[in-house]
Structures are given as C-alpha cells and as structure tokens.
Amino acid sequence: MSVAITKKKKNIPQQNFHFNWKEIKRNFIRHRAIFLMSIPVLIYYLIFYYAPMYGVVIAFKDFSPKLGILGSSWAGLKHFYDFFNSYYFSRLIKNTLLLSFYSILWGFPAPIIFALLLNEIKYERFKKGVQTITYMPHFISLVVIAGLIKDFVATNGIINDLIVYLGGERSNLLINPSLFRTIYIVSGIWQSVGFNSIIYLAAISGISPELYEAAVIDGAGRWKQVLHITIPSIAPTIIILFILQIGNLMNVGFEKVLLLYNDSILETADVISTFVYRKGLLEFNYSYSAAVGLFNSVINCILLVAANFTSRKISETSLW
Amino acid sequence: MVVKKTIGEKIFDFLNILFMAIFSFLCIAPILHVLFASFSDPLQLMRNQGIILKPLGFTLKGYQLVFRMPGILTGYKNTLIYVIGGTLINILMTSIGAYVLTFKNWGYTKFLMILVVITMFFSGGLIPSYLLMQKLHLTDTRWALLIPGAISSWNLIVMRTGFMSIPASLQESARIDGAGEWTILFRIILPLSKAVLAVMTLFYAVGHWNSWFGAMVYLRDRAKFPLQLILREILVQESQTATVSQFSQVIKVGELNMYKPLIKYTTIIIATVPVLCFYPFVQKYFMEGVMVGSVKE
Amino acid sequence: MKKHLRIFSLVLVLVLTFTACSGKKANPSTNQKDSSSTTAKQEEKQTDKKEKVKLKYMYPLTSDYLQVVDDLNGSIVIQKLSEMFNIEFEFIHPPTGQEKEQFNLMIASNELPDMITHDFGIPNYPGGGNKAIADDNYLRLNELIESHAPNFKKILDNDAELRKTIITDEGNIWGLPMIDKEAQDSFTGPVIRQDWLDDLGLKAPHTIEEWHHVLTQFKAEKNATIPFVIGSQGLPVNDAFIGAYGVKADFFQVDNKIKYGPIEPGYKEYLAEMNKWYNEGLIDRDFPTGGQEVPYMTTGKSGATTNGFWVFEPWETASEDPNMKLVGLPYPVLKEGDKPHFRQNNLRMRGFFTSITTACKNPERAMEFMDYFYTDEGFVLANYGIEGETFEIVDGKYQYTDKMLKNPEGVPMNIALVKYAYSHGAFLRDWHREDNAFPADALAACKIWQNSADADYMMPPITLTAEEGVEYSNVMGDISTYVDEMRLKFIMGVEPLDKFEDYVQQIEKMNLQRAIEIQQTALDRYNAK
C-alpha cells in the first residue's frame, strides 16, 4: 500500500512557485501562449474578486455608512468577542456543525447513488422522464416547500397517519427538537437529489462504452461493472465535490431553517445564520454580521485545506 | 449487446424502476400542488390545508392579476437577455480559465488554484463591490449583471475537473502537430466535453434565471429589471402582514387580500415553468457526450 | 484655444437667456387657460416668482401601487403641487423587499437624493435621525420649519405629546411625519364568532373565566377542535389576554418606571392559564408552527382569535359556513370591572418621516412643498383629491366618487388612493377616509377595542443612542431568545411551572438589569423633552 502511494507521488510534477524574475521570464517565453490566455481570467479575478476584498476589514471596525469602510473607526476584535460571549454561542456552533455534518453524511452520497441507479435503467424514455421530474423540486420556492413540509409533519398530517397505522402515537414532528435535523435533511435530499445528480450523470456519460464492453467480455456482471468502472471513472468528480462540500460546512443557509423552525425547537434548530438574521432584525449592524461571516469563512477554509491535504495523501485527486 | 439477465438482476431492475416511479411522484407532487393551486378558486384555496392534487374550482384570475402587474413582460425580455448574454460570457470565460488551470507544465497552477479557492471564502461584501461598479461606470447598465459574475469559482473547478478527464496525450500530440493553445481548447477540449459544457450551461443559465440580487443592487431603472426581481417584489409584498411598521400601517384589504395565496402560486408558476422546460434540451447532450466519447479513442 | 472657449461661453449665455425668456413667456399663457379658479391665480403668483427646481425623491412605492401609476408623478396630488411650487420630481422607488440594502448603499456610496420618505421598507437612518444630522447627511429642520412651514409648526405647537414623538432627545427635528388629524382607534383585538355564541345561547365573554367557558362550549358543542387561535409565539395579538394579568411579554412602564413583563408574577399566572388551555385542547397542539389561522377560522375548526377589523369581511366570505358572523370583543380582564392597561395604541404620529438631505440645493422649496400637506386645502387634496372628480361633499361629509371606489384600474380603493389622492407619506391624514372600504360592524369593533382598555402602561416611542443600541441588542438578543423559547415550553408543559423561579434567575443572570437601565434612561430622556 505504501509503495503505491509513493509511486503516485512521483507522478505529480513538483509545483514550487517562487517569484524569481529570471525563472518567470524563462517560463513566460516557454509558455507564452498559456500566459496570454490566462490574462483575461487573471484580470477578471483581480478586478472583480480581489479589488473589493479590502471590505473584510469591516469585521474589525465599527462601520458607519457615512465614513465608509476605510474611514470607520477600528473596533478590534470587539464583534468577535460579542459573538463568542453570546449565551448561545456553543449551542449555535454545535447545531450548525451537526446539521451540516449529517447533511453531508446522508446528503452527499444520495445524488451519487441516485445517478448510479438511474444509469442502470435501460428504458431511455423512462429514464429521461425521471430525470426531468426529479430535478423539479430544486426550483420550487422554499416558502412553498416549507409550507408543504409543515403540513406533512403536522399532527393531522400524512406522516402521522402513517405512524398511527404502524401503531405509533400522533404528535407534531416539528415541535419535537430531536426530529428537526431529520426533517431538515430528508427534505433537503428530496429537494436536491435530482438536481445534484446531474453533474454525476454527465460524468457517467463521459465514460467510454469500450470499457464496459471489455468488462462484459471479462465476464463482469452489472454490479462489478459499477464497482470497477463507473465509480472509479467518476471518482475525481466525487472527490472534488466532496472537498468543496467540506469547505462549506459552516454555511447553513438561514432561509429554510427560518421557515421551518419555531421557538419550541430552538435547542436543535437555531444555527449561526438564523441567529445573525434575528440579530439583524433588532439592529443594523453590518460589522457584527461581517465578523460572524469571517469566522465561518476561516473555519471553512481550514477545513477545505485539511480535506484537500487528506485527499492528496490518499488519492491522486486534489484541488492543487 | 444482448446479455441474458439473471434473476437477481431482474429483481433489482424491477425494484429500481418501482423506486424511481415512487420518487418521481414525490417530486412532481409539489409542482402539481402549485400548478393546481394557481388555478384554484381563491376562497377554497384560503381554507385549504395540505397538498392539492386536483384544482379546487377553476379561475384564471390569478394570472390576470399577476400579468396586470407592471414590468412582467419587459421582465421576461430582460431576463432572456441576461440568461443568454450572461451564459455565453460565463462559458467562454470559465472554459478559458478551466483550461489554463489544467496546464501543468508551468509552475503556477497551484498558485492560481489557491487564488481561485480563496475567492470562494473571502469577499469584500456588498459595499466595496458596489463602489467598484460605480467607479467602472457599470451601475445601472445591463453589463452590471453580465460581467461581475463572469466566472463562478465553484463552476470553474468543476469544469476543470471535467477537462482533466480528457487524456493528456490528445493535447500533447496536438501540440507536437503545431496546434496553438486556443486551437486545442476550441477544437479538441471543448468538443470532447459536451456533457460538462451542458451541465455548466445549465448551472449558469439557471443561476441567471433565478438571480435578482445583483439587479437589486446595481440597477435603478425599472425598465432593466429582470423578471425575478419583479416577481420577488410581488411575493414579498403578498407575504407582508397588514401592519408594516410599528407606527405606520396602511391596511391592504379587499380583492388583493383575498387573492393573496392565488397570486403567490401564480407567481411561482410564472417564475419556474420556463426553467423547468430548459432541462430536456440540456439532457440531450449527456447522450451525445457518450457518442463523441466512444469515437475519440 | 482660450478664444474659442470664450466665444463658446458667450453663445452658451445667449442661448440660456433666450430659453429662460421664452420659458417665462410660455408660463403665463398656459396659466391663462384655467385662470378661472382661484387656485390657478395662486399658482400664477408662485410660478412668477420661482424658477423651476428639480428634486430627487426616494419614496417607498410597492408593486401594488405600481399597478396604478408608473411612479409617484402619476398622483394627481403630486402633479398639482409640482405645478404650484414649480418643482420637477424625479422619484426613486426601491424594489419591494430590498429597500434596506438600497438605502444603505445609497448612503455608503454618497448618492443621496434630495428628499427621503421612510417606512414601508425604507429603514430609519442607522443610529437614528439625530445621527443622520450629526453625520451631515440630513438637514436639521427646526429652523426651516420656523421660517418656511407655518402650518406644520402650528400643528406641532398645539400638541405637546405629538411634538415629543417628532423631536429627537437632543431637540432636533429630522423629518416630517404622517400625522392623523385625530388619533386612530385601536384596530386589533379579540374576534369571536357571534353566530356560535347565539346558537349556544352564550353571552359575549369578558373575563378570562368566561372565555374559558365559552371556548370549552365551542369545543364540546360546535365540534371546534381548536377553539382559540393563539399565535405561534403563545401570545395573542397586541397583549390581549396577557394584558388581563397586568403585564405584557416585553418592556412596559408603570408611572414612568420600566418593567420587564416576562419576570413578573402576572406573567406566570398567564402561563399557568394557557398551560391549562393547552392541556384541555382549547388551543392548537401545534401552535408553535403557526400560520394556520385563516384555514382554521374559515373551516370552523376555530371560533375565536385575535386579529384586526380588516379580516371580518374576507373571512366571512371565504367561510364554508354561510352564517359565519364575526364580531370584536373587549380586551379580556381577570374580573368584571377591571380595565386592562394594554391594547393596540395609535399615536397621532404615524411614521413616514420625510427628511431633506444635505444634497438638496433647494431645501426651502422642499419645505414649502411639504408644509402644504398640513394646510386645510392640502388636507382635503391629499385625503380626498379634487372636488367633483374624486369626491363630493354630501351632508357636510366627504364622499368618494365612483372614480375612486369603482376606479377604471379595477384595484381596491386604498390602492387607488395613490393616484387620485395621496396614500402615504408626510401629510395630515384623515383615517376615516378608508371607512368606505369596511362594513359598519368591523368599524364598530374598533370602538369596542379602543374603549375596553387603556394604553397607559404602553411604552412611548423612545429612541436609543447608537452605543446604547449595540449594548441593548447584545443583552436582549439572548434574553428574548431564551424568553420566547421558555414561554412555549411552559405553555406546552415541557417545563413545569415550578421552574419559573429558576427561569427568572437565569434572565437576571443574563444581565437584564442593564437592559432595564438603558430603557429607563431613554424613557427619562423622552419624558424630559
């Protein structure tokens, strides 16, 4: 096993970049074409992403619209302290991380499995129809989705009918703190599995049929084909998306949580973004929400670097 | 390729199809709910609880009311401009960027990748971006919706992953034959990446279709507003309660109040149906990707 | 090069004087056409002495209103006043729902318009009006009012309480608000199905005990599974019911001393009663998830709620039961003869503060324009439009014509107001102007609500300074989350009420005292005005 890893390592070209003018010049002459090609993209990134980035300092300031971002007075780490000292800080972090973690645990493999299952269906019309339909919930307004979820889990809702049929007792599932994550995640999978599987279906469609033909000749059954051809072929896509997903762990959007939660289940449902949202209603504090956002981004960034590092160690695929 | 199925495979196929059929029903139900609700009698709709799987009465009043709102038709036109123009710019810029990032022989790929990844986490926020656009004289122009989002870093990375699945030997042999980088990108890479391109087109186009935030920030002239911003105004307004602020209230009564839920559903239908119809066009290219792929080697 | 410039500027001056002359000539001729009426003569006088000014005006106009007009220049009131004061308005109507972002960007990028009307989405200046003056963004209007707004000044001078709500703690005036000619009656309160009361031969409940009895009867006899709609927060609207216990679920004041309701003994009694109702199934088992009021009321699942007078007619129309009849009931009390100290309370000041910014080059003209809305003529024009066109005087009362009531645009009257009169903004309002749109017993409900309770424990509109605001929200952000969460737990019985003392101690530990101090300071400042 260790042999294999070192072998892989050798295949990756060493990418040590340092700003040595001579080298840059030599590089430029050798790779003139690619340099020129990168210019529009580089300029785009510098202007539209990096030029406004001085705005992150807003998290360390007491922002006043009149004085502007650079003119506002420094607040140091005040906004961070305010956030860390909040009575609910640990609960918010815990809820956010758990919700995200379970979302990835169940929600990340779902579209992959879905794409693989769909790929096994040989009736083209049916397959296309299923794809087209399952992609729809992604586009329905969250307000409607949340309204339907509430109806389904209400005391008189369809899910309770099922529970009673199976011998359980009626209760509203959305006032039970221990069920919030399940409801959030299951509905999330239902909403997005079709849409998210598109990227995997596209990757699957890029696999050369010759590989399968060869496998059939070797006597591989369908299960073996999936295991030894389909999954390895789309593995780079899976890994890259997984790394990106890990780098998104702290971002739980507030809209759906806000639409689903109520004061009786805050102990599991309250996450960082809803907390900041509620605070935003009380006041008008740009700097505070920027500080929380920055805190999230830093953690996300660390997680992504770690995920990328790990992935580079155990597979050939990584972002850089 | 006719292979006889084993019993296990047959059972699997049956269960698979059954599962897909049930799941499809679960996915289409809310669409039907919204669709039927948008045609329903407002009074019955008002008292309704739960999912609607057949129209409650029939009326086109919701559509009449929504299409009476100003700017819906120009909104459609504007959105079309943003979707088509924006997606073209997106695909062009993102392919160039993704191609540059697949190039491994120079020392800068890692540096550039990190440059890209950073932008996924840190941004200056709304105000610096607005001031930048103001300096570039792009505010209140259509360009403000086309240019700033030209590349999404996430999509860039996904597209690069797609490009990297093409065997490097193809590029190398083209280079040896004297092909320039642009030729390689447009003649070799892109034609072989139709499936990825289709996905990217879908993601970007859907993004443009659904976007309203940029328009809200950068546009003042209502004649340039995209559909989603106008529909959002309607939705937000319909969900507002009668008491708007503590001391000021103007009560919204009568017709509009009664038609509130109807207008909500109609608006959602108008906003989503076109984008739902978009998918089958893209789907075609997944299949094509297979055929091209089979020819290539 | 210089020579060219000189010639060019000469030509420019010539052109300008020529157009200015022709402009002057053109004006009287247009005025002559309708010089028959007296107002036209006034206009003539004013246009003679004033040259045209342009004003950029940020004004909230949601998409409802945009069905009727392209922008506020479509209002006949604005058209008339534009002419009268020779002002050309350029309106900015930010997208509905995104007003806050646009407002902030506008300040941050220093693109101030000349005038701004707040509310209906457009937020107050961050840190308050006083901060806006200190930041040199808004003009201090005190002097301008003194010199150019005699009518507004008169209203202010005649009502000391009103004045307090308009002037900042520092004595500045940063905007002119909508003012009701007389304060509007309370417009929310308990609502019940009269037809059910009649069927069961019950008298209208007043005390909490009577309410309990009536709701129990509704459940038993009328098959109402959820007799009373309580709202997702476990609080009926505008302190009804909880007010009977002498508290509300927030800050209030008794003889100018601040109290925080959720730690008072009365609050505990309220929770105990609601817990009983919850256990007996008088309120929804699912109430925290909220949002089901309309279907519950219109399908006979519920028979009572708290809401506003505008729901009566739509709900009765939508109801499955054609006999459904809603009435407003007095705010409940603990025992007969009590009078609650809380209710929905309307001040004469109704928000919509309209400010003049430092970007405005003609603040005097802007002020004169605004002042007109507080004159007697302006009052009639803004509320009722033009006599013979949009209103007639019948028996000494203003009556809208069909142009308003059955307007060609086919929109409800209160939307049509934006075109044929003035719907919202800084003006003197007659709230009775919308009476036409409501049935008589809905309006009668307002009288009942208004008279059944006093509002003497309610907080006046105090303002916090920017520093106080930050500290206050840091403290109260956590406390109100805790209080809201615990209220539901107590009502639903998840937490037993013997834990109430621990709960109070926890709130104290979260530094409630500091929040009370801040509120007290602000209240004292307000009273000292």
Image (cartoon, coloured by chain):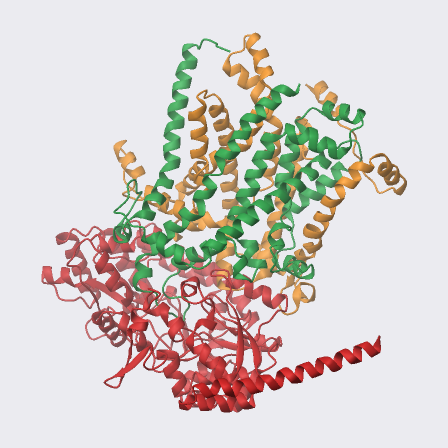
x and y percentages locating residue C94 in the rendered image? 51, 64
Q: Nearer the viewer, residue C25 or A183?
A: C25
- Counting every numbered tag in the picture gives 0
Residue drawn at x 69%, y 24% is B167
Q: Nearer the viewer, residue A121 or A65?
A: A121
Query: Which quarter of the figure is the N terminus of chain A placed in?
Result: top right
Left or right, residue C52 beside residue A38: left
Left or right, residue B125 beside residue B184: left
Q: Which chain is green?
A: B
x and y percentages locating residue A191 in the rendered image? 44, 39
Q: Which chain is orange?
A: A
Chain C visual colour: red
Residue drawn at x 45%, y 26% is A127
Up-down: is A182 above or below C47? Answer: above
Q: Nearer the viewer, residue C266 or B210?
A: B210
Up-down: is C117 above or below B112? Answer: below
Left or right, residue C278 beside residue C352: left
Up-down: is C459 above or below B80? Answer: below
x and y percentages locating residue A87 in the rendered image? 51, 55
